[in-house]
Image: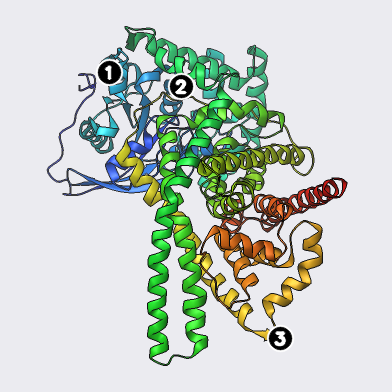
Amino acid sequence: MNAIKSKFKIKPLKKTAPPQKTFNIAIAGNPNVGKSTVFNALTGMHQHTGNWPGKTIECAFGEYLFENEIFKITDLPGTYSLMANSPEEEIARDYICFQNPDAIIITLDATCLERNLNLALQILKITNKAVICVNLIDEATKKKIKIDLDELSLQLGVPVVATNARSKKGLNLLMKNVKKVCAGEIKTFKIKNYYNKDLENSVKSFATHFKNNLNTNAEWLGLQLLENNKSIREAIKNNLGYEIFSDKKIKKHYFKERKKLLSSLNCSVPSQVAKDTTKKSEEIFSLCVKIENNNYDKYDRTIDKILTSKLTGFPIMILLLLGIFWITLSGANYPSELIASGLFWFQDKLLDFFIGIGTPKWIYGIFILGIYRTLAWVVSVMLPPMAIFFPLFTFLEDVGYLPRVAFNLDKIFKNCGAHGKQALTMCMGLGCNACGVMGCRIIDSPRERLIALITNNFIPCNGRFPLLISIITMFFVGNSFCHSFVSTLILTSVVIFSIIITFLTSKLLSKTILKGVKSSFVLELPPYRKPQIGKILVRSIFDRTIFVLKRAVIVAAPAGLIIWLMSNIKIGSLSILSHCALFLDPFAKFIGLDGVILMAFILGFPANEIVFPIIIMSYMSESTILSLESPTQLHTLLVNNGWTYITAICVMLFSLMHFPCGTTCLTIKKETNSLKWTFLSFIIPTAIGIIVCAAAANVLKLINILI
């Protein structure tokens, strides 16, 4: 349906126009309205999209060739406002205000248009070079929500196009209108003033004093300044090279207008702006939208009553966690064995080849028995569980369940002085802590973002699951009937314990080094959507599994080299590895471990997957990492080297609470741009792990004595 009435004047293209032009356009909108889906459909870049708020934190860029014109497209972070109270809002605001794009695609969700119109109205206050994309029109149709696109276009003064980006419906018409707006073929209109009259007059009066000094919307900037938006002055300086209050006349007029405005309003300037914008949104919505079935969201709300209920919400979360772990553990065993067999078979062939051609022992030792064998272990251990876990995780994300997890945990995190969205980063940490750290970007508050970032390592990642599962199987389950289910039950309990530690540490940090005011946030519960299985598989395998595996391989390769050298270079009758283990042994015994185990954790810094192989290698006094023959043989080996159930418990505890792996530390450094916070992220979980392990070991030893 074409939303452009005769009010828009279409200019014919000049014959002298060049055959190909380049236009810069941006895609803006609230979180979870399908912005990134529109972007992916146009550019083919397949940026990660998900059915929960805050997925796009940085701008994504791509190009699209349409009707012989090049469109450079920027996917802005999803934001509810341009008030710039968060990094996402600042990025979106600065791009729209200062980069002067040729057009902006304002993406709205057809099923919740009234709420989305707030941001659209804010953007249209800055520029009218825009096209409204009413996305998810298919869902609106199913819910019997009818939108008068022509009327909406007249109310907003810009073209309006209905789309279903998932199936690429309406995108061609969308781009036709975008092209016409960019080329000036469509005359758009500035939306009529709807702010309080005193507010409008003050803004106009104030803006006249600096209007000629700026190449952007002076009235909108004047409004931001009158709102006492502190970040806008810095943005003007950074983007335009202009210190607006360096002119004493402008500064004087600012204080005059602000004082007059505050005396005339019954509330703060931001509150008045929000009130007027909301009122205008409601007015436009009532004119343009007709809902035939007022209970259109009854299905979603019925499910939410179960999934977010105080009575059933947490049990369902635990059952889902249990189910995911059971499927992952049960499904990963055979593929892991198959991959390991293939990789180690190839290793033997390589070894025979190098020995056959007379290669020196130290060369094939380093490259095959050191680097290759370490990588073989990492790939065989990590790939199958990730290939199962990530699609399951992405499935829950795609249907819209993860925001419900954040909703359920929000009150607990708030009581801990942390942020409810930390629940989402914890979920990501189950796959990879580095991904969890990157996910902390969705948290607006810098203080609460640091809390989430520091505590993310308490959630066991895929690299720690093999160690946890092996210990659970050998020391607490054995060969009992239904051992797979019992192992899963214990592993789920371990993860729940790690979540409790996350809560307690978050509380501790919020009361000590990260004191501050708790922030509030709007968490949108998106509608439940039918999962796209094909896209889930592609996204989870390529965007997550391969991405994480690649990072692990990069850090594991040099680790294999170091391990082989330490195992083969001897001082006296003992290897360097043995000397280090003996040195660490007294302290390790105090916390329930031994020197070999502690040394393995230290050497496993590049990748958690190699901790257990190092332990086995050291106990066997071999110079290479060994593959596991059977749980029974391994249990015997560990018991013969002094392991008890106390050792097993302490190893599991220290696996949960110790320094992040190399990949995660590098990610923390990149995210914080600070060695200080990287060091604290390293030392805090380690210190907590030492304290907890020492307490557990000595209490359990005392119980043994008393019994």
Amino acid tagged 3: Ser
Q: Earlier in the sequence, mark 2 or mark 3?
A: 2
Residue situated in front as seen by the camera: 649 or 645: 645
Tell me if residue 313 can be seen: yes
Asked if 394 appears above or below 567 in the picture, the reply is above
The structure residue drawn at horizontal position 21% and vertical position 31%, both measured from the top left corner, is 173
Q: Residue furthest left?
A: 15
Q: Is residue 702 left or right of residue 547?
A: right
Q: Which mark is residue 476?
A: none
Q: Which mark is residue 149?
A: 1
Distance between mark 3 and mark 1 Cα atoms: 83 Å
Residue situated in front as seen by the camera: 263 or 662: 662
Cβ atoms under marks 3 and 1 closer than 8 Å? no
Q: Earlier in the sequence, mark 2 or mark 1?
A: 2
Q: Is residue 683 left or right of residue 362?
A: right
Task: Sort mark 2 into few (<14), some (14-19) or many (20+) by Cα contacts within 10 Å.
Answer: many
Asked if 302 appears above or below 456 in the picture, the reply is above
Check disc 1 and report its element: helix, strand or loop: helix
Tell me if residue 607 can be seen: no
Q: Residue furthest bottom?
A: 358
Amino acid tagged 2: Asn
Q: Is residue 551 left or right of residue 28?
A: right
Q: Position of residue 420 (x, y in %)?
A: 61, 31
Colour scheme of this structure image?
A: rainbow
Q: Which mark is residue 118?
A: 2
Q: Which mark is residue 573?
A: 3
Q: Quadrant of the N terminus?
A: top left
Q: Is residue 502 left or right of residue 239?
A: right
